[in-house]
Amino acid sequence: MIAHLDLDAFFAAVELHRHPQLRGKPVVVGGDPDGRGVVATASYEARRYGIRSAMSSAEARRRCPGVIFLRPDHRTYRDWSRRVWSLVAAMAPVVEQVGIDEGYLVLPVGDPGEQAALIQLAIRERLRLSCSLGVATCKVVAKIGSDVRKPGGITLVPPGGEAAFLAPLPVRALPGVGPKAGARLAEAGIATIGRLAELADARLASLLPGRVGLELRRRAQGIDPRPVLAEPAEAVSLSTEETFPRDIGDRETLHGYLREMAGSLAEGLVRRGMTARTVTTKLRYPDFAIVTRSRSLELGIDDAETIADLACELLDRAFKARPGPVRLAGVGVAGFDRHKQLVLPGTDAEAEPVG
DNA sequence: TCTGGGGTCCTAGGACCC
DNA sequence: TCTGGGGTCCTAGGACCC
Ligand SMILES: [Mg+2]
Ligand SMILES: [Mg+2]
């Protein structure tokens, strides 16, 4: 059996440790309510006012004028996250962290419900943090399980009971069914995971085309062969972006921001001992449309100048397709290679034509 | 003064290769 | 010489997750 563990209102919970006088009050961790900020996490008291993650901070304040806003402090959350996951790692044989506040674990031998309760208790007693767990035979069922009795819940789905557990739940509870897929399914009258699970091939293909639909139907049936991985996945991209308080149309001003972002990306690459072969510039326009332009090089780079020059050139290219102003600009790098990698002598064999 | 920031993965067409 | 069938890489866009 495996478990999915998810910390409850994690950012808000960490902030309540730093500001205990705020306990019991509605608290939002998020961006500027007088600007373009959004809610990252709302405390459970704030949720009583209908405040939710991703809601604009201005809307959150309309719903609860007395709500206390705190800016996110990711470094501190990462520190707390490390404490949680090293504690869990000491109690479970295999741990795969998949986000700052959640992960999968293989439970130690013994009664799975008891083991999950022990881990939950340890996190509560040692770190004073609340978490929820789902225990099941596969990832997707464990993950949904951790969600259904939040906060502070444990849900155990017995082997063989997966499909029956999932069937009555709303289709949006299935990870991978987001706003778009959820709306398409709702239009078609598919409200529950059970209905998705029993869709015939043709109907599925018309509603959720491609491999995505096939995979979601398998998950809806409680079938998910993904293993719990002991090794963290290698990063495939690194990016930084900024939403401006006011839209910016001036090319030179944007170049300045892009150069700054290029600098922090270069730092990130050097710190990781990586080089990148692809640079991408991203723009978001007032109508929320996103335009990206990217360019790949033959050799990897990790210096601020080169990334900055490319990012600015890509912005100019994007502006030819669609001129500004923009509300957001960003730069990303991808196509990583290990820095100072040993170059091996060529081992290519001559390939034969096929067919 | 609606709508963050950092990510992953998928799709689809064209280039190019065998 | 009316037209195969892969495969990979690149680019751009998009859905989704926390
Ligand atoms: Mg959580
Ligand atoms: Mg989570």
Image (spheres, coloured by chain):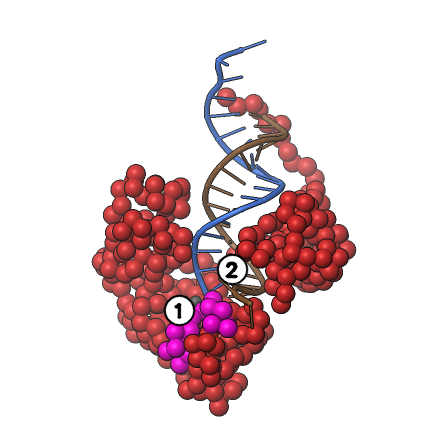
Chain colours: A red, B brown, C blue
Residue A232's mark?
2
Residue A176, position as x, y percentages in the image:
40, 54
Instruction: Give the alpha-carbon distance from disc 1 to disc 2, as whole Å.
Output: 16 Å
Mark 1 CB lies closer than 8 A to ligand 1 = no
Can see residue A248?
Answer: yes
Please tell me which residue lies in front, A289 or A154.
Answer: A289
Mark 1 burial class by Cα count in 10 Å: few <14, some 14-19, many 20+: many
User: In this picture, which residue range is highlighted in magenta?
Assistant: A41-59
Which picture quadrant has residue A262? Answer: bottom right
Mark 2 burial class by Cα count in 10 Å: few <14, some 14-19, many 20+: few
Instruction: Determine if the magenta segment contains residue A55.
Output: yes
Which picture quadrant has residue B10? Answer: top left
Residue A277, position as x, y percentages in the image:
67, 48
Q: Pick whichever of labels 1 and 2 is earlier in the sequence.
A: 1
Name the element at disc 2.
loop
Q: Amino acid at mark 2?
A: Pro
Name the residue carrying label 1. A5
Which chain does the residue under circle 2 lie in? A
Q: Amino acid at mark 1?
A: Leu
| A109 sits left or right of A100 in the view | left
Q: Quadrant of the N terminus of chain A?
A: bottom left
Closest to the camera, between mark 1 and mark 2, is 1
Q: Residue at x 63, y 47 (%)?
A: A322
Can see residue A89?
Answer: no
User: Looking at the image, is A79 positioned above or below residue A322?
Assistant: below
Q: Residue at x 44, y 79 (%)?
A: A64
Q: Residue at x 28, y 52 (%)?
A: A190
Which chain does the residue under circle 1 lie in? A
Residue A15, position as x, y percentages in the image:
51, 81
Residue A249, position as x, y percentages in the image:
68, 57
Instruction: Residue lying at the far bottom in this picture: please name it.
Output: A21
